[in-house]
Image (cartoon, helix red, strand yellow):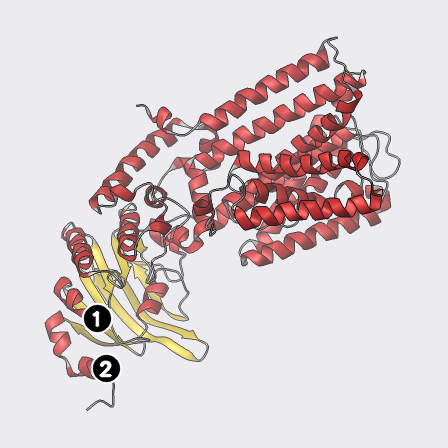
Amino acid sequence: MSALDRLPSGHGDRALIAGVVCLLVGALFALTPLRVQLPSAFYVFVEVGILFVIYGVLVLGLDLQYGHTGLVNFGHVVFFAVGAYATAMLSAQDTFAGIGLGYPWPLGLAAGVIAAAILGAAVSLTSIRLRGDFLAIVTLATAEIFHSVFVNFDNIFGGNVGILGVPRPIAALVTDSDTRLVATLLVLGGVTLLTLAIVTRLTEAPYGRVLRAIRADELVTRSVGKSTITYKTQAFVYGAALAGFAGGLFALYNGAVAPGFFTIQVTVTVWIGMLLGGAANHRAVLAGLAIIMGLRLVSRFALDVTPVSGDVFASIRLIVVGLILVAVIRYRPAGIWGDPQELGVDQ
Amino acid sequence: MSLLSADGLVKEFGGLRAIDGLSVSIDEGELVGVMGPNGAGKSTFFNCVSGVIQPDDGTVSLNGTDVTGDAPESLAHRGLVRTFQNTRELETMTVRDNVRLAAPDQPGERTLPALLRSGSMQEREEAVRERADELIEMFELDHLADEYSSNLSGGQRKLLELARTLMLDPDILLLDEPFAGVNPTLTGEIADHVRDLNNDGMTVVIIEHELETLTELVDRLVVLQQGQLLVEGEPEAVLEDERVIEAYLGGDAE
């Protein structure tokens, strides 16, 4: 058996292939006159699907930080927002308010990743040596600070309106709205699968072993010669960069960014998705995210068949989602597909 | 020349001087036992020497280099590795991964080779796996290799910890109570391993309360009391020393 056979590679390589296929099919729709027509009831599924694959990149970043390394980041949305704003401000042309520099969108996307990574590095430099709960507080506070900054510095960030006129590369290629939605889902889905392939490679390599050791016991990991501060900083920055990347994708899909897209609700959604699916397992966190986002979507339809008003229904929906979470935590504390022994929780 | 030497070490916790001007020197190839009543400063001594805590005063040198206050990871690179009094396993990892983790010089622990699955990483990993399996077999843990280490008994954990430290092929090994909570059969086994390692040239320092095993095992005993060096010398002589007897029975004992 060669060394190559012995290293685990299955999931990562399958994700790589699936990602490339998605991208190619998406490009086919975007670049050729090929058209699709969606039944109108499907729109909402495709739209939520697009948001899911964008959030998928977010949750993979969060899982690298928390699931694998044990770093508690309660402000994940801030890296998403900074990535989105940086991309938008660099590439937007006719912004209604705020700055738009009109550079090509790939440059904007790169800037989004870099800006989020820099913020991640700044947060790690100040807080990563502290005990875990301090990092949680610092990240939460950072997210709140940036939210107010985006809202209040109108002439830079456009206030509550945000930045409009962000280029939409896929929409620019496809004028037909049905085909555009499908192409967007395929391209972004492909990107998410490629992200999955990359994080899988990283965590299946000896690199991931060090991350998991840090989560288990940092002092032991240091005493066998690993510079844990470096690894923790890297994991945090990589997670932040992925969130920034997701933010850039969001801006380029949506064509606009505004503070309303980047509330604490985003952080909560990806955290729930990660814990529901099972932290430290890339495919599980994506599945968990799909469950929580799917649940919200399906419950919308339930409104039509229930004899209660919208307000009452919204409350019931929260209760139902809450009960499901309680049930999962009670009966599967490591998440649906999580390994309780690997996560060190009592079943 | 001494391999490891601590000179005038001081460490205070609040108002308490856990070690107070302690100087100990370990020669290359020695097998040294450190004993003393509870609170004598044995573990604090290990912690200062291994970089887990910073001494308030004094110096530590390893192989002639001043390493005072160096981080545990940099000391591990210099060949000094330790175990912990309460075994610290990476409980959420398997026995195999616990041992493999400690392998030095794995390029796959850096981002780029990991992402590219570089040839050097693959090659190194193959060697790492082989060596880890050897050590796991040597400590008779092979039937448990794929178990999470949280499922191991106290004695098995001590063995695993030893296997993990050996992965680093250290020049000097500091063992903090390797026999505590271990049944007599396993105690004998661990002692045999330690003796073998020492015969192969590894310098070993052991903190231990299990005096019988310790005195049989070591070349030299160092006795601490209230953070200071009380007596040191050959085991038999040390155990008969009146100051040692008094320290263990308490100052007021008749």
Res. A237 in view: no
Quick one: B80 or A207, which is closer to the camera?
A207
The residue furthest right is A96
| Kind of residue indicated by mark 1 | Val
| Kind of residue indicated by mark 2 | Ala
Secondary element at tag 2: helix
Q: Chain of mark 2?
A: B
Q: Position of residue B224 (x, y in %)?
A: 26, 75
The picture quadrant where one finds residue B183 is bottom left
Q: Position of residue A280 (x, y in %)?
A: 51, 41
Q: Position of residue B166 (x, y in %)?
A: 27, 48
State the residue at coordinates (45%, 26%). Answer: A10
Q: Position of residue A212 (x, y in %)?
A: 45, 45
Residue B247, disc: 2
Quick one: A41 or B104, which is closer to the camera?
A41
Residue B222, disc: 1
User: Relative to B110, is B66 above or below?
Assistant: below
